[in-house]
């Protein structure tokens, strides 16, 4: 039997067993399910932050960008995450103090229930898309290693993602994340000398690359480059998963310190992804760009190291999918069902409905993944949906005292609908990502409407700011 199949399946079985363990031993309440009982230690918070962020968006979507446009354009593109992490350092402790399950809960404390409902809808539109391309990325791994068709592979990965999420909640997600983070960093570091040797050193790599790959912009215009940078930067700043991890930390201090380890880990993984995918241009000039890192792992490294990277890569895809599935489920259960339920549902009922919602959203993610042609395409749509509709609202909630309810709601509606209009209605004119159209409209709307209504729609501002400051 194919050794890659044995190892990858073996690791997936291990993850599934870990999910069962936490389902039986650690998940007794909805608090355990959504935020791991708010008792995750520092190293686990760092690991789950890294694995949640460095999923298919980096290993598949990021590698695809590098393979198509070269390392220098990729540095600009992928640096959005690193810049965003620096800003998160100053926000993490405030988020932990708030002890929220979801970002819309945090928004409601300052701007009311209607702002919470609207933000929940747009988060769902983005997160189901992000989960969808994790399924597609995992399907590529199975296709390369076993020959399973991508369509069938997406179903297999989807079933595992749904199972892990519905069983152990954030406990199983966080701890499997940490293990996968260690594996991918270790595999990259050990494999680096072999890849350097395979391409004839850095000078040999330079000689092997086409001129476009060596250019500073990879043949992209400045608006196109900005259009790739902004979605990652905006997503990480407002990502509900980041805020959920901070809320799950043992303390505000742990939440803040975790961003330092997250920053270092992100630089390591992204830096080596750029090098490995660039090496793939030279070693495998005619492959599907989405599979650049996977080809290096299988055909460019010694078998044991390739197996480590491959197992960690597929684990990253799965645990990132579980993270976004869990987070989106929380939006439906807490921001919609519980918030508007006439009778107060019991904690056990919330836990049951959370698990059922995970199944439904997982099926929806699979269907959405079949609509988009590539991981990079759905990645940019999903990131922009979140970045334009939600991130300005999240930052204004935490940092801008003059933001108002009217400004927040208008900004979300304009940012979200503009993204859909640009991507689907206009079919991406000039080949520009929709963020260049929707983000300026969203931010401008937020500022102008807030200033025009500054004495009419500021809900619970003083209460929220006092809570955020501890």
Image (cartoon, helix red, strand yellow):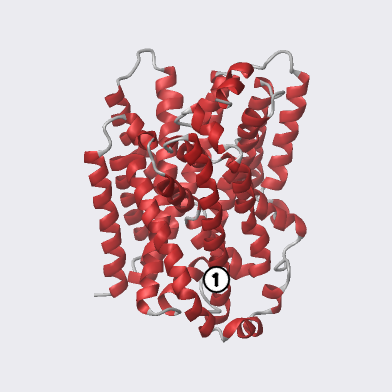
Q: Residue 324, percent across and down? A: 44, 43
Q: Is residue 64 above or below residue 409?
A: below
Q: Which residue is more in the foreground, 177 or 333? A: 177
Q: Position of residue 409 (x, y in %)?
A: 63, 25
User: Can the viewer see residue 37 in this picture?
Assistant: yes
The picture places residue 378, in percent across and down from the top left corner, at 54, 52
Q: Is residue 258 above or below residue 108?
A: below
Horizontal side, residue 79 vs residue 314: left or right: right
Q: Quadrant of residue 15?
A: bottom left
Q: Residue furthest front?
A: 253
Locate the C terminus by quadrant: top right
Q: Dot 1 surroundings within 10 Å: few (below 14), some, or many (20 or more)?
A: many
Please identify the quadrant where the N terminus is shown: bottom left
Q: Residue at x 47, y 43 (%)?
A: 128
Between 91 and 433, the one nearer to me in the picture? 91
Residue at the spot 43% in from the left edge and 73% down from the top edge: 297
Residue 122 visible? The answer is no
Q: Which residue is mark 1?
A: 277
Name the residue: 45% across, 63% down. 185
Q: Quadrant of residue 162?
A: top left
Question: Residue at image x 58%, y 67%?
Answer: 274
- Would residue 338 appear left or right of 276 to someone viewing this image? left
Residue 325: give x, y in percent of width and height: 41, 42
Label 1: element kind: helix
Quadrant housing residue 206? bottom right
Total of numbered circles in the picture? 1
């Amino acid at each position: 039997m194919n050794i890659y199949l044995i190892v990858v399946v073996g690791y997936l079985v291990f993850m599934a067993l870990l999910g069962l363990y936490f389902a039986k031993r650690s998940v007794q309440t909805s608090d355990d399910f959504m935020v791991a009982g708010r008792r995750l230690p520092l190293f686990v918070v760092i690991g789950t932050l890294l694995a949640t962020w460095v999923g298919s968006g980096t290993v598949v979507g990021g590698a695809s960008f590098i393979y198509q446009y070269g390392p220098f354009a990729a540095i600009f593109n992928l640096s959005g995450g690193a810049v965003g992490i620096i800003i998160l350092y100053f926000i993490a402790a405030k988020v932990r103090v708030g002890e929220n399950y979801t970002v819309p809960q945090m928004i409601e404390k300052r701007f009311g229930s209607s702002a919470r409902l609207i933000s929940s809808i747009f988060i769902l539109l983005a997160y189901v898309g992000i989960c969808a391309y994790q399924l597609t990325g995992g399907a590529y791994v199975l296709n390369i290693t076993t020959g399973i068709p991508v369509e069938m592979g997406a179903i297999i990965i989807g079933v595992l993602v749904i199972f892990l999420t519905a069983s152990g909640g954030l406990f199983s997600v966080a701890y499997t994340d940490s293990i996968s983070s260690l594996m991918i960093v270790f595999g990259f570091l050990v494999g680096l000398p072999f890849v350097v040797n395979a391409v004839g050193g850095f000078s040999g790599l330079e000689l092997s690359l086409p001129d476009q790959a060596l250019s500073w912009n990879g043949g992209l215009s400045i608006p196109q480059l900005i259009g790739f940078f902004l979605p990652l930067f905006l997503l990480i700043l407002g990502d509900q998963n980041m805020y959920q991890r901070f809320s799950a930390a043992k303390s505000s201090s742990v939440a803040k310190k975790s961003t330092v380890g997250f920053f270092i880990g992100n630089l390591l993984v992204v830096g080596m992804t750029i090098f490995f995918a660039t090496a793939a241009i030279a070693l495998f000039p005619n492959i599907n760009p989405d599979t650049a890192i996977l080809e290096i792992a299988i055909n460019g490294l010694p078998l044991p190291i390739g197996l480590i990277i491959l197992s960690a890569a597929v684990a990253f895809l799965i645990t990132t999918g579980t993270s976004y599935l869990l987070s989106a489920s929380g939006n439906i259960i807490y921001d919609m069902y519980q918030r508007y339920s006439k009778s107060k549902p019991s904690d056990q009922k919330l836990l049951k409905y959370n698990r059922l919602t995970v199944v439904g959203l997982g099926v929806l993610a699979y269907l959405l993944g079949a609509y988009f042609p590539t991981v990079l395409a759905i990645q940019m749509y999903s990131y922009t949906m979140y970045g334009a509709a939600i991130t300005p609202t999240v930052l204004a909630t935490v940092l801008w005292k003059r933001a108002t309810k009217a400004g927040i709601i208008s900004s979300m509606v304009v940012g979200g609908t503009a993204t859909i209009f640009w991507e689907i209605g206009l079919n991406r004119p000039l080949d520009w990502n929709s963020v260049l159209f929707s983000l300026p409209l969203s931010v401008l709307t937020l500022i102008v409407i807030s200033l025009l209504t500054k004495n009419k729609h500021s809900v619970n501002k003083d209460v929220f700011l006092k809570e955020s400051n501890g």
